[in-house]
Image (tube, grey):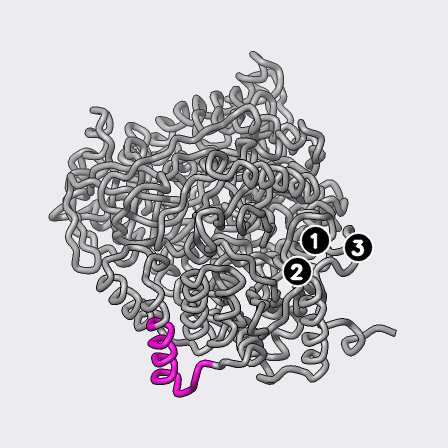
Amino acid sequence: MSGPYTQPLVYSFGQGRADGTSAMKEILGGKGAGLAEMTTIGIPVPPGFTIASSLCLHYLESRSFPKRLQVQVENALQRLEASAGKHFGDGDDPLLVSVRSGAAVSMPGMMETILNLGLNDTTVEGLTRQSGNPGFAWDSYRRFVQMYGTVVFDLPKVPFEQCLELRKHRCQVQRDIDLPLTELQAVVREFKEIIREQAGRDFPEEPLDQLWGAIAAVFESWNTRRAIDYRKLHDIPDAMGTAVSIVAMVFGNLGEDSGTGVAFSRDPSTGERALYGEYLLNAQGEDVVSGSRTPLPIATLKDRMPQAYQELERVARTLERHFRDVQDTEFTIERGRLYMLQTRRGQRSGQAAVRIACEMVDEGQITEEEAVARIPPNDLNQLLHPAIDPHSTLDLLTTGLPASPGAASGTLVFDADRAERLGRDGEAVILVRRETSPEDFHGMVMAKAVLTARGGMTSHAAVVARGMGKPCVVGAQALEVDERTHRFSVNGRMVAEGEWITVDGSTGKVFAGKAALIPPEMSGNFTRLMQWADRIRQLRVRVNADTPADAHRGRDFGAEGIGLCRTEHMFFEGDRLIAMRQMIVAQDTEGRKRALAKLMPMQRSDFEAIFRAMEGFPVTIRLLDPPLHEFLPKEPAEIEALAGELGMDSAALHTIIHRLAEVNPMLGLRGCRLGIIYPEITAMQVRAIFEAACTVALRKGRVMPEVMIPLTATVVEFRKQALIVRQVAEEVFRDRQITVPFLLGTMIELPRAAVTADELAREAQFFSFGTNDLTQTTWGLSRDDAGRFLPYYLEHGVIEADPFQVLDQAGVGRLIQMASELGRKTRPDLKLGICGEHGGEPGAVAFCDRLGMNYVSCSPFRLPIARLAAAQATLAERGTMDRTRATV
């Protein structure tokens, strides 16, 4: 009978079968499992043992160790002594150990490690005799006391570093290891005194006391601020805990025939199949990562220590074949002999991930399905947009919300007209606004990037920038934008128009100056990966496209139709905006019809081009959605100019704008409510749609229009608008003497629509879930104002994720599931899709796949991400994803 009291708490390296150790990551942690696995398959690893991660939370709760752990550690230590041929605490030939952390999920640098444990005033003499190198022995002792003081006693590093630097300065040496022996001995004494004074306790001389203190400290490091923050960022459970590995020391600081380093089996930046990494001679691992010395490229080890380099290459290849993935390893060379101290799955760039996956398929190491399963979908962003060169020196100004990925540099411009003018002249500009409106569209088109002080992830700036594939940062609340004086201030620093800044829409960071950028690369491997994903996935992927250019871009990225064509975006510039405004200010129905007659041929022309671009794939067209006041200016000077342009009294225009203003436009006169109050708007748009469809059908043969009625709350609203759609469609088909099949559906973006979806499905042939507004109405949040407090909520754990970035499956998702089930209960063939920005979020894509939706729709540059996520969702259903991840 097994249970918590019969399971071992301590595992020596090599315990168990080779095919079972990697599955023990939950028990041994990634580091412990890797060391055990390497031992089992014959890789040179120093002997050691691992304390199970389950003890971590036990210790943190009780601040004590169970008695049986102490017995098992002592037994494992005896086995370690036998393997090493040395004894712990022996004054003649002492066994020294490292004590290392390691959770089941890698958390690089977040927890603690202690090296050279077991040294004291007696054992240091034994190490001196065995090594024949007193400088090495006392340098190792110095390192250990310093590390023990900062890790176990939690003392600040500064006093130790100041003491060491003072000694080096007096002796006029650059490296710690170059200090004379007497100075190293003095440093050890001073370090012990620092511990005594600041901790109120003596440094422990007994090696077993040192060991238990170190084990406790590693467990304690699970709850350091940096470890907690890292877990929160990467969604790692707090209840996981860390294992502790105790490993016999091997020394890279014995002289110029010794060293230590880090090596990847392939280049993690490019994916090239070549050993990649850094090392230092006569050093310990902390020297490589601390920055105290400049490491050397791993390739130079081939000339300095050819035998060790060849062995390292062999080991890297062996590990890669065994684990069937790129390995990130740590190693030490002791007097020419190689020892491996860690192996784990190597983190890599998006470019490298795609190349490595494809080449490992070609090499026969993995299958196409495994290649698809291994690449985090969001990593594809790096292939689709320019990125900031990681080697750039950057001057951070502020951070906002990463609304549209990619990076761009340009000079500051605060006016859309000026942005358009300078952009047309070939200048790189960044448009900065408090918040954007439809009037800024022409400036956004010509700008390299957009930056706003207000707004959220689904604000006007965010949605428009994503559609165009432009970098955008919104909600940078530290920005105080003064559009009158053409400058902004941030934390007391003033930045004026004409100065260079760099916007990183992938991270939300804004930098002063012009950063070096890396252009995106879409290789043949990317195309292969997408082809594999498309063969696997069941969920269709459409694009949100409002213009013919967007439609063509969507097809280039593999879109299988348009899931959302926002007709209002066709009215944001030039003559279209003027005609739209004439319609809004018209005093009667006839006046509105005259203005709409000007807009109709423009809409028809756009729809024709969009239908042609889609080549027979379905096109879902949303009728006019936003409130009318969004098309009108807000600033007095702009209102005066518009009044002159429209040939009307400015006071009368002010009155109209004031009359249209709403306290909460999100819940006001918009969507189907506009079409019900002003049916002539719906009639014009529908006529443009079907005339365009007939024209394309006559010339090319096949179009698939889907007319979507927005913001429906009741089935009566839907019926009223559907009646207009069908009547106009029949008129057009009769006039053109051709009938074009079409679907008529609604956008589910109100909770009431979701809970009465069975009623709506009696009339609607499809539902498209508008998750942007459904999130707003479910949470009672304004996406433009929520940026004032959502960062605080995230930081303090009130919510786990921004619901506008990551679909709230528990709340919004529950409504979507309810609507889907109710709708298909009434109409089994009801087509279901999602068209909010969540359509390109991998978690939401998997959610939609589980619900049996027909498609997801997203902005053009997120299409590859959605395609890959959809394939991974299919693999997850088959169980392939879990098996693949288990090998990584």
Say above or below: 834 vs 215.
Answer: above
Mark 2–mark 1 CB contact (< 8 Å): yes
User: Viewed as shown, does residue 665 lie left or right of 758?
Assistant: left
For residue 47, the mark is 2
x, y (%) of residue 649? Answer: 16, 42
Q: Position of residue 16 (x, y in %)?
A: 78, 59
Locate residue 375: give its quadrant. Answer: top right
Asked whether residue 192 is drawn in magenta, I would say yes
Q: Earlier in the sequence, mark 3 or mark 2?
A: 3
Q: Is residue 725 visible?
A: no
Query: What is the three-letter code of the residue carrying label 3?
Result: Arg
In which quadrant of the rendered view does residue 546 lie? Answer: top left
Quadrant in the picture for the N terminus: bottom right
> Could you classify mark 2 by the number of other residues whose Cα lies within 10 Å: few (under 14), some (14-19), or many (20 or more)?
many
Local crowd size for mark 1, using a 10 Å CA cut-off: few (<14), some (14–19), many (≥20): many
Q: Is residue 117 left or right of residue 78?
A: left
Residue 39 - label: 1
Q: How many marks?
A: 3
Asked whether residue 42 is drawn in magenta, I would say no
Q: Which residue is mark 3?
A: 17
Front-lying residue, 240 or 341: 341
